[in-house]
Amino acid sequence: MKYGIKFVLICLLIIGFSRAQSPRFDLDKDLLLAQFDCKTDVDDLHTVAALTTLLSHPDFGNIKYHAVAGTYGIQEGLYVPAEELFELAFGANWSDAHGNHEKALKEVLEKVERSLDQGGDIWVADAGQSDFSAKWIKLLLKRQPKIKVKERIHIVQHSNWNEEVTAPELLEYVKETIDYHKIPDGNTMGNGTPGFRSDQQIDWKPFLRDTPSLVKVWEMAISIGNSYNGKEGRYVNTSIASGGLDFSDLSEICYILGLEDIKDANEFFQLLEE
């Protein structure tokens, strides 16, 4: 692309269209935790691909991040297994809370403590429920009770349904204990956050023509999503079923990084085009 995302956002700010607040995420110190429930909606798979695309941009390529699969709450329905996608997208930089819950908690806690010790804050995009977050926060406070988690741990949630199927006591715990941000739903446009759910097919490949590795991630995300969408009682994502995209959970990460002014999926790819 001719201009980077930061340049575009500065221009938007100057002409009065930017809704971004003061910088939230410190690119040099903070840790981004991208936690995906993967149950039972397949939209998380598209969000994995979108996050990988965002992290490939030079403005965000050095972000300290860790992804977690299987951070679901009390909802019924089957899990969407996508280990191959997480490995392709994130390499070794992810944990499998569905396959080994306790191991994932330990891995995340170690990364959280390391980042806090180095002066960084923790920003959590709960692409799903907050049960897993509540568990590692409790473990953290048992080990380091003096940490000011209300100031240094931030959770971002965009979905009413995700809150409804978080164990009530754990949702109350995170809201009372840490810095909890509820933002407008990323499935809808024009509400203050990007609307990343589209019923219409989006021709995304031309925007990634110079990055075949990202094309592979998107192709795998779409393929696995199609194979599990609505199957065996799983949620039917009508946008994906009609050939569109749904990476609505990325709205949380856009909030964290100050990218709320991206309008929709088409504009997302346009801004990231190299």
Image (spheres, rainbow, N blue to C red):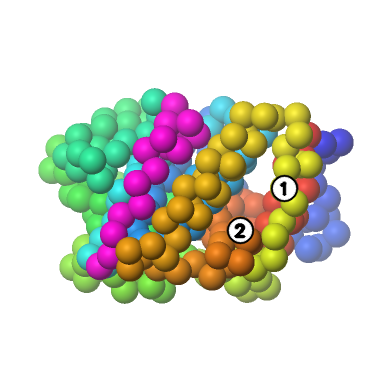
Mark 1 is surrounded, within 10 Å at the Cα level, by few (under 14), some (14 to 19) or many (20 or more) other residues, namely some
Q: Quadrant of residue 109?
A: top left
Identify the residue under disc 1: 204
Query: Quadrant where the N terminus lies?
Result: top right
Contact? badges 1 and 2 (CB < 8 Å): yes
Residue 94 horizontal side relative to residue 173, left or right: right
Which residue sits at x=55%, y=56%?
247
Local secondary structure at mark 1: loop
Q: Quadrant of residue 239?
A: bottom right
> Is-magenta flag for residue 23?
no
What is the total number of numbered labels drawn onto the structure image?
A: 2
The amino acid at mark 1 is Trp
Query: Quadrant where the C terminus lies?
Result: top right
- Residue in front for this viewpoint, 18 or 266: 266
The amino acid at mark 2 is Leu
Find the magenta span and give its range. Answer: 76-91
Task: From the top left corner, tell me how far across and down residue 10 is, in percent.
Answer: 78, 48
Which of the numbered marks, if any, corresponds to residue 245? 2
Which of the numbered marks, if any, corresponds to residue 30? none
Task: From the top left corner, tell me how far across and down residue 5 is, in percent.
Answer: 74, 42
Which residue sits at x=49%, y=67%?
237
Does the image show residue 262?
no
> Is-magenta flag for residue 79?
yes
* Lower sequence index among marks 1 and 2: 1
Which residue sits at x=41%, y=35%?
84
Which residue sits at x=53%, y=32%?
63
Task: From the top left corner, tell me how far across and down residue 31 is, in percent.
Answer: 43, 37
